[in-house]
Amino acid sequence: MRQSLFTLLITLGFALLSVISISAQETWTLEKCVQYALDNNITIEQLKMSARMTELSTDDAIHARYPNLNGGVGFNANFGRTIDPVTNAFSTEAFFSNNISLQSGILLYNGGRLKNAIRQAEINQKAAGYDISQTQRDISLLVANAYLSVLFAQENQKITANQNELTKQQLAQLEKLISAGSVPANDRLTLEAQIATNEQNMISNENAIATAILNLKQLLRLDVDTEISVETPATDIPISTDVDVLSFSDVYKSALTTQPNIKAATLDLQSAEVGLEIAESALKPSLSAFGSLGTTYSNRGIKVNGTELQYQDVNILFNNVPTTIGIEQSIPLIEDNPYLSQLNDNLSIGAGVSLNVPIYNNHINKNNVERARLNIANVALTNEQLKDNLKVNVQQALSDARAAKKQLAAAKKSVEATQAAYANAEKRYNLGSINTYDYVTSKNQLDIAQVNLIIARFDYIFKSKVIDFYMGYPLKLN
């Protein structure tokens, strides 16, 4: 009784662990996989940082139009002979001084450099956004391919498992015939070999599923130990685009308007053209205005606070007779000048304009203009190359999709033909008209045809999704 209870508890424990394991295994849809990959991709994060840097460059260009303002405070201790900054007199006594200043300047005209710098920064900012979009689309296509690979491997395993189960049922039926003496015992060897082959294929398929899921995890940047399962569509995955109806011109024109990298390349050319205007502005005069405000303080600063009358004796000769007389003089009253009073008394204000005319700069500005022109030509060639590559890719994608569609149609016909042949072989086998080897051969041909159909179906699904990619359609499996 105790042993039975212990066995029951162990069984329940394993059952509970199985439930927990199944519940921990999360089911992922294609949309969820794509979104997760986009949210956690390092390249996209780097591009976002670059885009943020471009935003800061735009902000720099905009604020460069406004006046700057800088302040300064200085504290000085002087020893020995030096000039007092307040009295401008030489002093040999140690003293302490303090100066405060504000400076401001603004660029009034520089040949349109600031205006064009803002334009270029805004264009670069838009181009950076398109670079992010293109990378997101590329990653989405990679994730879709990996997702379909998992579905293909799982579908292949289902067919192999069904084939193996059917073979086992046939072996059980054969055993009855052998027991009845209707067929020789050696006939079971062929079916047993087929079962062994099926089981070997199932192991290979399990490895293929694990590899496909691992590839998907790597794209999603998931931990290897994370258990996931992909959602299998309830119905056959629909094909939204008929590649036989589309022409190359239709797909290519759509790709030119929907592919973010083409839009980014167009903006890069505009940025290069603005760069030429920026380089040419260095050949023109520039006009700036500036202003300053400053004051000083010294601990030796003094001020006059009124006067007082004093009589001083002065010795003179009057008729050659030394005589002392008293002279009334107004003597200034000196006292220390307070800190705030000195700052107010010593306040100075300055303003002015500055004109800079480029005359000769060792061909630096001229060469920069030539570099800007070469950059325009280089970017234009890059754009042409990008469009040529897109044209080739679209042609190849359309050709591959059409070939995949034909292959799928041929695979369907092959399955239909081999199914009919297998049904006929099964009837003949049950009547004893053919041996087990011929029967198994017919079944293997059907198995191969069904596997080829799966391969053709998923190949066409993915290649049709590539066409959707160039047409600008979202990646979906329903």
Image (tube, grey):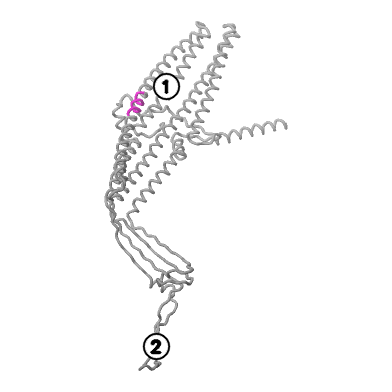
The rendered magenta stretch, by its main secondary structure, is classed as: helix
Q: Dot 1 corresponds to which residue?
A: 456
Q: Position of residue 262 (x, y in %)?
A: 33, 36
Residue 392 belongs to the span the image colors magenta: yes
Q: Which residues are magenta?
A: 391-399
Nearer to the camera, 381 or 119: 381
User: Which residue is depicted at the point 61% across and 32% down?
Assistant: 15
Q: Position of residue 392 (x, y in %)?
A: 34, 27
Q: Dot 2 corresponds to which residue?
A: 309
- 93 over 5 or under it: above or below: below
Q: Position of residue 362 (x, y in %)?
A: 31, 46
Instruction: Report, in whole angstroms, how far the alpha carbon at label 1 lies from the one at label 2.
Output: 119 Å
* Image quadrant assignment for residue 133: top left
Q: Position of residue 114 (x, y in %)?
A: 31, 50
Residue 289 belongs to the span the image colors magenta: no
Disc nearest the viewer among 1 and 2 = 2
- 39 over 300 or under it: above or below: above
| SS class, disc 1 | helix
